[in-house]
Amino acid sequence: MNPLQWIPMPVVVPLLAAAFALLAEKLVPRRVVDALAVLVCAAVCVACMWLAHASAHAPLAYWYGEWGPTRGPVLGISFVVDSAGAGASAFIAGLFALTFLFVWHYFEEVRAHFHALMLMFCAAMIGFCLTHDLFNIFVWFETMSVIAFALTGYRLEDAALEGALNFTVINTVGSFLMMAGVGLAYAATGALDMALVGKILAERHADVLACGAFVLMSAAMLIKAAGVPFHFWLPDAHAVAPSPVSVIFSGVMVPVGLFGLGRLLTIVFAGVPAVASLAHGLLVPLGAVTAIIGGFMALQQTHVKRLLAYSTVSHVGVMLAALSLITVHGTAGWLLYMLGHGMVKACLFMAAGMLAAVLDSVDEFELYGRARGRPVLACCFFVAGLCLAGFPIGIMGSGAEAVEGAAKLTGDDWLGPIIIISSATTGGAVLRAGVRIFLGKGELPANKSPLPNESERGDRPWLLMLLPALVLVFANVSAAMPLERMARAAAATFVHMPVWDVLSGKQAYATAAVPAEASGGEFSGWLAVGIALVIAAAQLFLPGLLKNRVLWPAHISIRGLRALHAGRVGDQVAWLAAGLAMLTAGIVAMSVLH
Amino acid sequence: MLLRLLPWLAAAWLMAIGIYGMITSRHYVHLIGCLSVVQSGTYVVLLAIGFVWHAGPPIFYDHPPGTPAVDPVMQALVLTDVVVGAAVSALLLALALQLHKRRQTLDPEELEPVP
């Protein structure tokens, strides 16, 4: 069987299934559409795993309409499958399959629209990971965004509408920036194929156009990936979207933005020295700042979905820092971290969805002690919380260790403590919420203003909601070893793709050798778990601690941080403009230095 | 020289005033309009990139292939951009309409922030 012919299938099949779901919704029973969605995503997941296996030794290129480089100038659009892209696609499809199980019976009244949108969402993300054309990556970026907007505002409630509006506005500005960036890259090189653009840019001095293209495109990817100061849309969108949609947003959509940034850094702008120094000089610290701000904001939240959203910001910061090291070890670390974080965070959002479904709230004070009789869900929640806190068993823990080891190799030892802070704050926040919700322990404020109820359809099979969450936690804890090997092999191909050679026929990776392990050791993980437990206990039993006279600077700074995040859409756009200015200043400085 | 720079300056100006308008906007419909202004900036960028002096449209129906023409790739990109813009504006206006039905206001300042 020739794997080449199968490359478009992971995108084509979900799109066809989406069309079928819309056409057939009146003809076939509802369960058929539900089952079809699960089966299609599972099949795509298996197909992508097979593609990852087939591309282990050489990347596979597929030219649509056979408009390949053999016919003179490159006009065609290609998908190039490498192990990292195919592996990420397999993870995306797998998470969609589990989410479809989770939403069994969820959206009775809206017929098959939800399934059609989700299947197209899946296709768009996989296309984004596999494509090798700058304009095509914009198309998938935009498809992904528009579907995400529609899914966020789905429930047509007050909060959902406002969150969806802000999300749409910020991300649409992002796609316009991307569009302009793609245009500039074309103006600089006359090509749109990522590898060809990279080759042309590497052969000559970087000019204004190339630098402008990088600033615009990386800003767009950072908006999608929610790096500071582009992150303000994320908590709004994640908190108001239906929980199965939040699962996908946090688990894969936001990290996929980083995947795009990785492609820019390792293929398109790999030969531009100013960009490489900008990544190390600006994007790594930016990731660290994102990790800290997200973590401390997560500690302040009592709305469980909003808490999880801020923790996503924090973990994305760690991934951004690891990715911007642009080394094989850093890449292995963030791929592993992405997998582990995706599983853990998806599980936690599913748990939040289950609470909303059976107890009609996702606020930890409203839910105080009301989930006592649900031991399996509680176990799931606490194990996921411990994983988030850096528990050194499981994929997320290995990812954190790998990132720390990679940072040591490039002399960025200071990233280690940042990862510990990120893990400890986010894990501590989740564990604190868990103790209040499932154990009913801890201080309860007297004057708590009631929040609007957040109910989700409750008469769904409890076991089918619980099963995907259990699968995710179990996979995260038990599958670390094989996935770690795969991530390390995929990282080597991701960083050292001999881009243009691949397309002109010499199909082999430059370094097929898997680098030796570089790990930060288990100590940091245990330390982070310890700090997380201390933080959780302090928040539960010493609520007035920060008002203490000795700690007032912390109190003031946290209040300032909260005030910053209470801005309206105009403020968010202003921050976006500031971020763009920061990236521009950075690239100008780096160009002058070179 | 100035004539060659003009489209870039115009694009930068459109993007800058669009973003300024969004930052200071007190009405969501106005804000969506400003978003379209930003988008117009990208149209100008793309058209300027593909433009060739003294060349016709890239349609070789009544003149032979090989005569100078502007870059059709950029025009295809602009077309895609227009479609995207239409879809997003429609979605945004629909959301704004629903929001107005429920809250009787479209001023971002008056809409209560989520705690």
Image: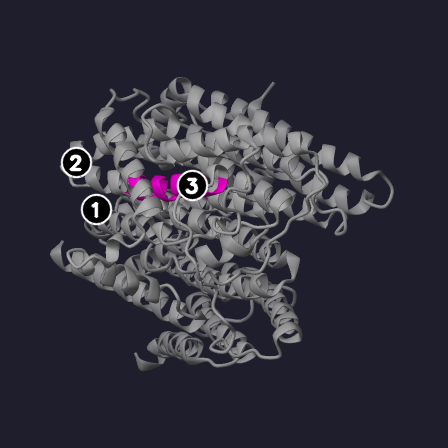
Report the front residue among B95 and A194: B95
User: Gap between marks 1 and 2, in whole Å?
Assistant: 10 Å
Instruction: Using a 10 Å C-alpha cutoff, classify the residue at mark 1 as few (fewer than 14 neighbours), some (14 to 19) or many (20 or more).
Output: some
Same chain for labels 3 and 1? Say yes or no: yes
Kindly identify which chain the residue marked by label 3 belongs to.
A
Left or right of A569 on screen, residue A213: left
Q: Based on the picture, tell me whether residue A283 belongs to the magenta stretch.
A: no
Question: Tag 3's secondary structure?
Answer: loop
Measuring 43% from the left and 23% from the top, which residue is drawn there? A477
Report the front residue among A208 and A253: A253
Question: Tag 1's secondary structure?
Answer: helix
User: Gap between marks 3 and 1, in whole Å?
Assistant: 45 Å
* Bounds of the magenta segment: A422-437
Q: Which residue is mark 2?
A: A410
Q: Which residue is mark 1?
A: A280
Q: Which residue is mark 3?
A: A441
Kindly identify which chain the residue marked by label 2 belongs to.
A
Q: Tell me how many marks there are.
A: 3
Measuring 39% from the left and 39% from the top, which residue is drawn there? A431
Amino acid type, callout 3: Lys
